[in-house]
Amino acid sequence: MLTSVRGLFAATLFAGAALAATPAFADDAGVPSDITISGNASLVTEYRFRGVDLSGGDIAVQGGVDISHSSGFYVGTWGSSLDEDTVGFGHTELDLYGGWSGEIASGVSGDIGVIYYAYPNAPAGDTDYVELYGSLSKTLGPVDATVGVAYAPKQDSLGGTDNFYVYTDLGVAVPNTPVSLKGHIGYTDGFLTFTNDGDAFDWSVGAEFAVNSNLSVGVSYVDAQGDYLPGDYKFTDGAVVGSLSVSF
């Protein structure tokens, strides 16, 4: 689901899958003070992965757990329901990931890691794959900006080819309100475009309302542009996507 895990959350967040969760268990009995365990759950009207609808226009249920260390290292898992007929991945996605995030220069934070995408209910054949990711984030006045890249090396599940994804996210909080505005644009080159020529753009604009520190609702418009493969369902058409997300 990486547009992202953690730092790479743009299009997925706009589709409703907010991976960043508010730490809740760092002080629980039995958990070392330098370890934080957090969780998240979302209900989204569609699951969009880099602009492509993977839930067949239906509601998707999503959730995950992160374990992070004060040094910046982390591991986590995230899952989502899918439509098994839309792109042939079965009805479940399960992601496992690990990496490091933290400040790398004054005012600049970085995130680097590896993610394993698993589709345990997929039809026969290779579908699982591994992807490396990295991003840089900085606050520029009222705007939070992130640039990131994800690269899946050649592997059987990608038809013996690789896949490259680059993106930019922008976010700004509306002063004196619980509302934030976000924008995203991404470009994919490779097997995971679902196109005839192997390249595609995706973009989204959206808003999120923080009900409290743990609960938020969001709405966004998500679209994808490219020479997409034909199908019975228009899984790359633009759509308004809503979300209800909770962190704990």
Image: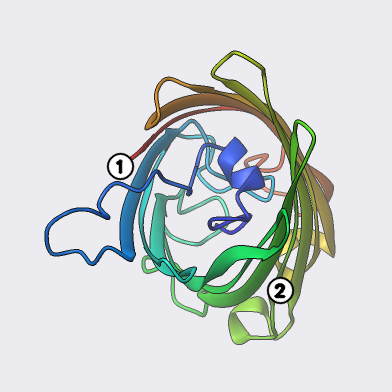
Residues under numbered marks 1 and 2 in contact, where contact means CB atoms less than 8 Å apart: no
Q: Amino acid at mark 1?
A: Phe
**Left or right, 5 with reference to 24:** right
**Left or right, 36 with reference to 200:** left
Question: Circle 2 sits on which residue?
Answer: 151
Residue 166: x, y in percent?
79, 60
Q: Which mark is residue 248?
A: 1
Instruction: Say which element carries label 2.
Output: strand
Q: Nearer the viewer, residue 158 or 4?
A: 4
Picture quadrant where residue 174 is located: top right
Above or below: residue 133 compared with residue 51:
below
Residue drawn at (58%, 63%), measured in percent from left and top? 102
Viewer-side label of 1, 2: 1
In the picture, the quarter occupied by the C terminus is: top left
In the picture, the quarter occupied by the N terminus is: bottom right
Picture quadrant where residue 10 is located: top right
**Left or right, 6 with reference to 153:** left
Residue drawn at (52%, 80%), measured in percent from left and top? 126
- Total number of numbered discs in the rendering: 2
Residue 201: x, y in percent?
83, 50
Instruction: Say which element carries label 1.
Output: loop
